[in-house]
Image (cartoon, coloured by chain):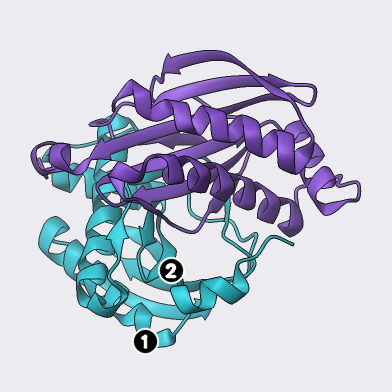
Chain colours: A purple, B cyan
Amino acid sequence: MKVEYINPFITTTVNVFATMLSCKITRVGLKVKERLQPEHEISGIIGLSGRAAGTVVLSLSRNVALSAASEMIGEEQNEINDDVADVIGELANMVAGGAKAQLTELEMSVSLPSVIIGKNHIIMGSSKVQTLSVLFSSAWGPLNVDVSLLESTQMATNITLD
Amino acid sequence: MKVEYINPFITTTVNVFATMLSCKITRVGLKVKERLQPEHEISGIIGLSGRAAGTVVLSLSRNVALSAASEMIGEEQNEINDDVADVIGELANMVAGGAKAQLTELEMSVSLPSVIIGKNHIIMGSSKVQTLSVLFSSAWGPLNVDVSLLESTQMATNITLD
């Protein structure tokens, strides 16, 4: 994927955390993701499709997830329940939606969010598409946003059944 | 979601397993899914978007995943590696793509697949959308296909930030 596509996801994530959660997050790294790498315990996943197809994963430590949900819901959350999962899904949705709005040339729309809960769960994308992983730090703990995007022009040649 | 939307997913899953994997699968149940319910160990997730937004999860026991990958790759697979994950992603992609082609009125496109590996991982969709879960049996073991779809007309009223 083109590296410039990652910037809207970075700025949107920073803005969503600042405006929705009053939480300042700082980008501390950017890397091409190895596959099979464990994520944090909670992942919000959104699919993107249109002139590019892709996936956005918002991956949060347990403490970041609970702190974000407490802030959004307006009362202390101590366990990962339906309400907390809904907040993580909404946050992933806002990140994908905000970035999509800046990438107008890709004419993408977003799927419903899925939220994965589980220690040591592993998310694997397609081996045919690079994932860029943005690492952030916050007062609540670490989080990252992983983005894989494949433009339709690439799809015809790259996604074939072996 | 409308119950009639589930049929294309059922017929496509049966066809994909028959034609791609020479594996006869039989539908043994259909239920509205409780949230927080553990899935099988391996899940292929695809996002759908367009006039309806949604998610399709193809959830496989370890043995079904390994047997399917062995059949597709043409050699015995004994561990869940990148190649196996790619096969599960492709299978989810074929199920979503085939069903989408039958639901032309929803004008949907599909995202890239994500594959989740992990014992006891939990996938939570949005609490605002019902998930229909179709249970199948096969000679390799059990599998299920979970579909949540929200039409755009519903989206305006149902998906709001609390």
Q: Where residue B147 sits in the image (x, y, percent)?
A: 43, 68
Residue at x 31% of width, y 26% of height: A130
Residue at x 24% of width, y 36% of height: B77
Q: Where residue A159 sits in the image (x, y, percent)?
A: 15, 41
Q: Where residue B18 sits in the image (x, y, percent)?
A: 15, 66
Residue at x 20% of width, y 70% of height: B101
Where on the picture, by quarter, is residue A53?
top left
Mark 1 closeness class: few <14, some 14–19, many ≥20 residues within 10 Å: few
Decide which of tag 2 and tag 1 comes sooner along the chain.
Answer: 1
Where on the picture, by quarter, is residue B36?
bottom right
Chain letter for mark 2: B
CB within 8 Å, label 2 to label 1: no
The correct choice, above or below, for B48 with respect to A106 in the image is below
Looking at the picture, which amino acid does disc 1 mark? Glu
Q: On the image, numbered disc 1 is attached to which residue?
A: B4
Element type at marker 1?
A: helix
**Side (left or right) of A154 relative to A115:** left
Looking at the picture, which amino acid does disc 2 mark? Val
Q: On the image, numbered disc 2 is attached to which residue?
A: B147
Rounded to the nearest angstrom, the CA distance separating label 2 from label 1 is 12 Å
Element type at marker 2?
A: strand
